Image: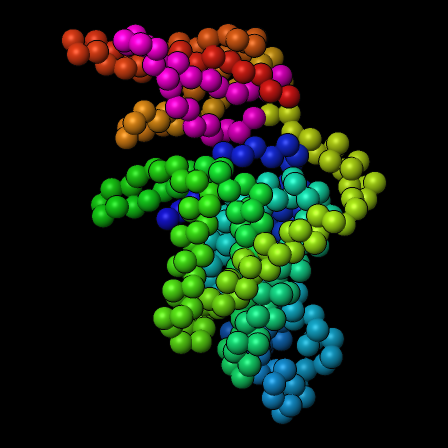
């Protein structure tokens, strides 16, 4: 299952989330620029290696600073392009809403603490492992745990490959994340420690710690600077991809739905990627919203309504709803 987007709109631009994604990408490029020997040394120095803390003869090769900073730096290293892309996409999907809820500074503290605690859980359960643990998966798992608590009924548009067919399915967040967590647990219990280089228990630990840390972080007061940044980062647009479930009135062949746009988009016009869901049928297309529309305006999409027994297909009318 690949998440495409969720249906919860964040009210502010995810500044911290974007910086975290950019930092991961930059550090990945830095690691690629090194030779093989330097790369291995770099990963062993800044990755999280449990044996560095359990074996004195190995710990002697690292300074106290290196031992401490590895609990943060390990979550910014990735073993390959797919590893990086998978993590950053999940962070992009779920991180913005958690940042929107907590505020920028509290979200940064939450993210780093989830990563540190996920590393500690891996360290305890793999005490003598000499394999470096790297990646943002543990911290992102914490973000996903918080999302499951904050938005359990949100819908996650999910790409599900079924044999040779690709199907888009909307799943409630608690189901999507529940399936994800179950997969992590089954993978952790059914494989040897860090099988295939994947720290499954770090994912599980991050998810659980994320749920617990959410309530703790929420108790912390927001800084005045955070409130000012929230004002500066307030969004003036609506999601580019919107899911619409048209309704039908009686035997009318036409169907009716709602499209959300912002005040700025109402003035200037906009392009939205629209996913029309009608029973088991789903259609995705680009919708052009003309400039100058007002609240309650109706956009007519010919031939996209319901089909009558006589074979006549009605139109789809989308009512414009302006949200600030």
Q: Which residues are magenta?
A: 238-263
From this viewpoint, which residue is outermost toward the bottom? 57
x, y percent for residue 86: 46, 53
Query: Does residue 55 appear in the picture of this structure?
Result: yes
239 part of magenta stretch? yes
Residue placed at 47% from the left, 24% from the top?
272
x, y percent for residue 313: 25, 11
Residue placed at 35% from the left, 38% from the top?
169
* Foreground residue among 179 and 129: 179
Instruction: Quadrant for the C terminus, please.
Output: top right
Residue placed at 42% from the left, 24% from the top?
244
Q: Is the residue 161 above or below the residue 294 in the image?
A: below
From this viewpoint, which residue is outermost toward the right? 224
Left or right of 107 on screen, residue 221:
right
x, y percent for residue 106: 72, 49
Residue placed at 52% from the left, 78% from the top?
126
């Amino acid at each position: 299952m690949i998440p495409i987007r969720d249906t919860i709109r964040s009210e502010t631009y995810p500044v911290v989330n974007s910086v975290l994604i950019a930092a991961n990408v930059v550090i990945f490029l830095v690691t690629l620029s090194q030779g093989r020997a330097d790369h291995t040394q770099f990963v062993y120095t800044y990755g999280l290696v449990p044996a560095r803390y359990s074996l004195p003869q190995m710990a002697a090769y690292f300074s106290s600073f290196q031992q401490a900073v590895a609990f943060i730096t390990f979550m910014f290293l990735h073993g390959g392009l797919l590893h990086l892309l998978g993590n950053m996409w999940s962070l992009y999907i779920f991180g913005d809403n958690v940042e929107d809820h907590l505020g920028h500074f509290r979200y940064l503290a939450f993210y780093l603490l989830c990563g540190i605690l996920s590393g500690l859980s891996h360290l305890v359960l793999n005490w003598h492992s000499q394999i470096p643990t790297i990646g943002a998966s543990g911290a992102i798992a914490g973000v996903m745990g918080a999302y499951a608590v904050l938005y359990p009924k949100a819908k996650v548009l999910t790409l599900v490959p079924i044999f040779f067919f690709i199907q888009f399915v909307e799943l409630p967040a608690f189901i999507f994340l529940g399936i994800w967590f179950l997969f992590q647990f089954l993978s952790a219990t059914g494989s040897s420690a860090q099988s295939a280089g994947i720290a499954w228990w770090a994912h599980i630990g991050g998810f659980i710690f994320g749920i617990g840390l959410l309530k703790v972080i929420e108790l912390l007061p927001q800084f005045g600077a955070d409130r000012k940044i929230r004002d500066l980062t307030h969004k003036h647009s609506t999601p580019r991809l919107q899911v619409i479930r048209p309704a039908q009135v009686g035997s009318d062949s036409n169907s009716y739905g709602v499209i959300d746009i912002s005040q700025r988009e109402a003035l200037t016009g906009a392009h939205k990627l629209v996913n029309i869901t009608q029973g088991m049928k789903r259609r995705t297309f680009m919708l052009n919203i003309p400039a100058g529309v007002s609240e309650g305006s109706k956009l007519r999409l010919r031939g996209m309504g319901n089909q009558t027994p006589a074979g006549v297909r009605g139109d789809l009318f989308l009512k414009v709803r302006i949200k600030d």
